Image (cartoon, grey):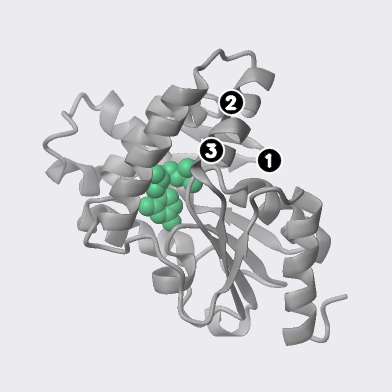
């Protein structure tokens, strides 16, 4: 079934705009969207709730396998509790990056992710969508942006949510997280072969979306 479903993968570092771009591409095409980062964020939160230290992550895979998650429109529930906002915090992002380095956690979440490939198509947003999860994807995109630009975007996003932060501190955290995501041994962050690489520094979301839709149209004539 999965092979018959067209998939567009959008990978890239945090703050590259993948989330917003993926949602808009999916909306334009009328396709489903997979925010794979939310699964790692949920696992991180579940590990924290279980009171397991982040230095001993053997238990994390068992937790990932047994995640009791419900997605309802834009809301996410973990063990019946609304965690929509909680999984978006900087701490949740950093914890997600730690559990994401555990091979067994990644293996446990693989099926979860592949099951999201449903007709009429899927836009999959993450770090290893094109390299590992959907290696046969129709179109693979790698979205990047400079650290400074990504820190600025994150600062603005947090400000809009009423959360105060420090732009230099955000840049340090982004660099740390990038380092972990790019250097881990399992599924490190790098462009899939043949990926369309877009550096979104200085580009609007609309321009990035249009670039991806144009590439999708060339590959899939039924996309308009
Ligand atoms: O995209 P995000 O910021 O919500 O992702 C949170 C963390 O999860 C990120 O630091 C890396 C990890 N992640 C991953 O390793 N593989 C994915 N496919 C998605 C996210």
Residue furthest right in the image: 224
Which residue sits at x=49%, y=42%? Answer: 147
Residue receiving disc 2: 155
Image coords of residue 148 (percent x, y): 53, 38
Viewer-proximal residue among 156 and 47: 156
> Distance between the Cα atoms at labels 1 and 3?
32 Å
In x, y percent, where is residue 94?
Answer: 35, 34
**Residues at discs 2 and 3 in contact (Cβ within 8 Å):** no
Question: Tag 2 or tag 1, which sits nearer the N-term?
Answer: 1
Q: Earlier in the sequence, mark 2 or mark 3?
A: 3
Q: Residue at x 64, y 18 (%)?
A: 159
Q: Secondary structure at mark 2?
A: helix
Where is the N terminus found, in terms of image quarters?
bottom right
Query: Which residue position holds label 1?
Result: 73
Q: Quadrant of residue 58?
A: top left
Judge from the rendering whether residue 127 lies leftward or rightward of residue 47; answer left or right: right
Dividing the picture into quarters, in which one does residue 219 lie?
A: bottom right
Q: Is residue 95 left or right of residue 2?
A: left
Per the model, the C-alpha gap separating discs 2 and 3 is 11 Å
* Residue topped by disc 3: 148
Measure how far apart labels 1 and 2 are at the Cα level: 26 Å
Q: Residue at x 11, y 37 (%)?
A: 56
Which residue is at 65% across, 78% downward?
6
């Amino acid at each position: 079934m999965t092979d018959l479903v067209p998939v567009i993968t959008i990978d890239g570092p945090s703050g590259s705009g993948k989330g917003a771009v993926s949602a808009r591409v999916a909306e334009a095409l009328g396709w489903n969207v997979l925010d794979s980062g939310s699964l790692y964020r949920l696992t991180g939160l579940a590990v924290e709730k279980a009171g397991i230290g982040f230095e001993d992550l053997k238990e994390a895979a068992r937790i990932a396998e047994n995640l009791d998650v419900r997605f309802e429109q834009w809301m996410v529930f973990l063990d019946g509790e609304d965690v929509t906002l909680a999984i978006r915090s900087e701490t949740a992002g950093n914890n997600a990056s730690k559990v994401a380095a555990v091979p067994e956690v990644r293996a446990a979440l693989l099926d979860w992710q592949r099951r999201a490939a449903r007709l009429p198509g899927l836009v999959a947003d993450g770090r290893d969508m094109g390299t590992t999860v959907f290696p046969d994807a129709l179109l693979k995109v790698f979205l990047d942006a400079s650290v400074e630009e990504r820190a600025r975007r994150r600062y603005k996003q947090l400000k809009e949510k009423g959360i105060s932060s420090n732009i230099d501190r955000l840049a340090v955290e982004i660099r740390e997280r990038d380092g972990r995501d790019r250097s881990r041994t399992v599924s490190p962050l790098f462009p899939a072969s043949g990926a369309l690489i877009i550096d979104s520094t200085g580009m609007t979301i609309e321009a990035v979306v249009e670039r991806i839709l144009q590439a999708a149209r060339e590959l899939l004539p039924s996309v308009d």
